[in-house]
Image: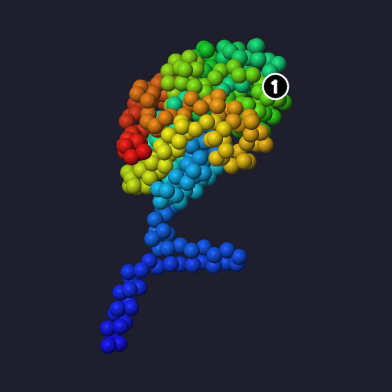
Amino acid sequence: MRQSLAATLFAALAAAPLTLTLATAPLALTLTTSEAAAQTKIKIMVGGIDKQIYLPAKLAEQLGYYKEQGLDVELYNTTSGQAAATALLAREVAGVVGFYDHTIDLQSKGKFITDVVQFGIAPGETILVKVDEAEKFSKPENWKGQALGVTGLGSATDFLTRYLASRAGLKNQDYTLVPVGAGDTFLAAIQQGKIVSGMTTEPTVQRALARNAAKVAIDLRTPETTRAALGGDYPAACLYMDRAYMEANKETAQKMVNALVKTLKWMHSHSAEEIADKMPKDFYAGEKALYVKGLADGKAQYSPDGLMQPGAPESVLRVLQAFSPSVKGKTIDLSKTFTTEFVAKANATN
């Protein structure tokens, strides 16, 4: 009899969900074992988490879409896409939110990373010129002998600035690139005359314009203006992963892409003000109106579905081959720089 009751009690306990309560005054956190097991931890590095070019990464978190997919995503911030790519190669993170061009640049150096979802169908960058020298230095052919600001050396702003200069007939040694970051450090560099022009993104652009510190010389915030300046499309912000990690963790990659594609679709059905309202207030740098204006001016940069545009990888490769010694003359397998496998499935379910 005793043995029968014990067996019955064990069976009942096994059938019920086990609840773990972690109590610390004054807050108690209760998790079921099934809920805890559902959360897959993943670390993602962002090359400037408060930059609007990378906004979908944080917005997906704010909307709860990562958790909806059963993901516990930790977003880490760094100063530039180059620093983020370095962290990925060091296996410190599972993925990077940075520019697609890094997939080509790194393949030329024997490293294989793959873009799994495309955020940006334009770079979302501008060349700003010091306001009192705007007439002279708005044109790249006049940059010879000048100091030009970029986020960081080896970053996408480095690549694009060098290409614009090469298209104007300048060689790499004809000018100096100065890493000035973004936000306050960029504004200080241009106001103090450390650079005559520089490439940056929102919300820094609106802050510089509002202070009358700079004028827009070259606009890469829409596909149309990008084609005019670069001679073709330039897909930019994306989530890329080490190719070996991606192949070994397809379920996790798919969940990340599901969340991000859903975020892009949400963005295209909401206004700049509604998007801004979802973001952390410290991203506004105390100037929400400027943040909203930056979003409104640059909204065309965001992909509606996360897909790579036809012919766009070839366009990026052409740009890099024009000035980069590491890419020039190299055979690049573009099919390994991006995949539509996850995005296609995400679009089929969203």
Residue at 48% x, 25% y is: 300
Give above or below for 217 relative to 54: above
**View extreme (bottom): residue:** 1
Residue 259: x and y, percent? 42, 42
**Where is residue 180, by image quadrant?**
top right
Q: Is residue 21 left or right of residue 112?
A: right
Residue 246: x and y, percent? 36, 43
Residue 212: x and y, percent? 70, 22
**Where is residue 8, by image quadrant?**
bottom left
The residue lying toward the viewer, choosing from 296 and 227, is 296
The residue lying toward the viewer, choosing from 333 and 264, is 264
- The amino acid type found where label 1 is placed reads Asn
Instruction: Quickly name the residue at label 1.
Output: 212
Q: Residues within 10 Å of mark 1 (few under 14, many from 20)?
A: few
Residue at 51% x, 66% y is: 22
**View extreme (right): residue:** 192
Residue 159 seen from this side: no
Residue 218: x and y, percent? 56, 18
Give above or below for 121 relative to 256: above
Secondary structure of residue under mark 1? loop
The residue lying toward the viewer, choosing from 147 and 227, is 227
The quadrant of the image that shows the C terminus is: top left
